[in-house]
Amino acid sequence: GQQLNQSPQSMFIQEGEDVSMNCTSSSIFNTWLWYKQDPGEGPVLLIALYKAGELTSNGRLTAQFGITRKDSFLNISASIPSDVGIYFCAGQATWMAETSGSRLTFGEGTQLTVNP
Amino acid sequence: DTEVTQTPKHLVMGMTNKKSLKCEQHMGHRAMYWYKQKAKKPPELMFVYSYEKLSINESVPSRFSPECPNSSLLNLHLHALQPEDSALYLCASSLGLGLRYEQYFGPGTRLTVT
């Protein structure tokens, strides 16, 4: 099956630093999504990417859909304490079933800790 | 508004109990999902409903029984659960099924089976 390799697994940074994390796959994906999850809460959608090469920003967050369609990265600039949480990448691919396209394949997550 | 609500927030149940989890969205989404999430792991898909019909059952044990009474509501009925079923249960919805329909998650129900 399709798998996403997300790295790093965890990051410990100082407030104000920039952060970068990425997801790679051996398979092609048609959509990349980035979610953030706080402890005890559900994942919150940060950015959605639909086109190879696409670069999209949401405030201090920037994400790119890799040109090969097999990877994506997320950058956070000037981190603040509330950026703490687990960040998940998720991909969607054409799925050979009657409900093709809905299945999300998740990365294992990046745990971000920001020290004030 | 991209809000999906879930009740209860927390649930503790014994292995012989019957309980239900509820999920609601008013975004006009036609696809709804149940996920199970263990600590520090990504969500795992359990069920998908499209237009109130079950589209996907990811070989989930029959002690979990989903129900979609209408396009805004999704229930998960629980019976005779095992301690290993303790997890965060997440509901999600999307406008439809397909590659460009993002899934929006609710806050989850933290389930503990004793």
Image (cartoon, rainbow, N blue to C red):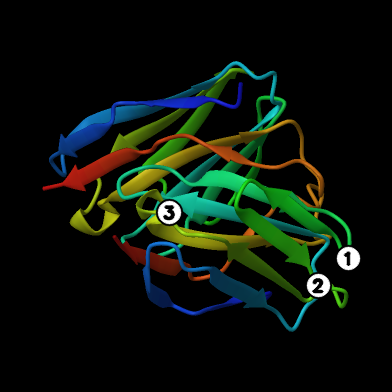
Which residue is painted at 49% across and 79% down in the image?
A: A8
For the N terminus of chain B, the image quarter is top right
Q: Position of residue B88 (x, y in %)?
A: 33, 47
- In the picture, residue B92 is in which quadrant? top right
Q: Is residue A69 left or right of residue A32?
A: right
Write down the chain letter for disc 1.
A
In this rendered view, identify the residue nearer to me: A116 or A34.
A116
Q: Is label 2 or label 3 in front?
A: 3
Write down the chain letter for disc 2.
A
- In the picture, residue B79 is in which quadrant? top left
Write down the chain letter for disc 3.
A
Tell me if residue A4 can be seen. no
**Contact, CB < 8 Å: mark 1 with mark 2?**
yes
Q: Is residue B54 left or right of residue A11?
A: right
The three-letter code of the residue at mark 3 reads: Asp
**Residues behind callouts 3 and 1 on a single chain:** yes
Secondary element under disc 2, as helix, strand or loop, is loop
The three-letter code of the residue at mark 1 reads: Ala
Provide the residue designation for mark 2: A66
Q: Position of residue A34 (x, y in %)?
A: 62, 56
Dot 2: few (<14), some (14–19), or many (≥20) neighbours within 10 Å? many
Q: Which mark is residue A52?
A: 1
Dot 3: few (<14), some (14–19), or many (≥20) neighbours within 10 Å? some
User: Gap in Å between the C-alphas at discs 1 and 2?
Assistant: 6 Å
Q: Earlier in the sequence, mark 1 or mark 2?
A: 1
Provide the residue designation for mark 3: A83
Dot 1: few (<14), some (14–19), or many (≥20) neighbours within 10 Å? some
The three-letter code of the residue at mark 2 reads: Gly
Q: Earlier in the sequence, mark 3 or mark 1?
A: 1
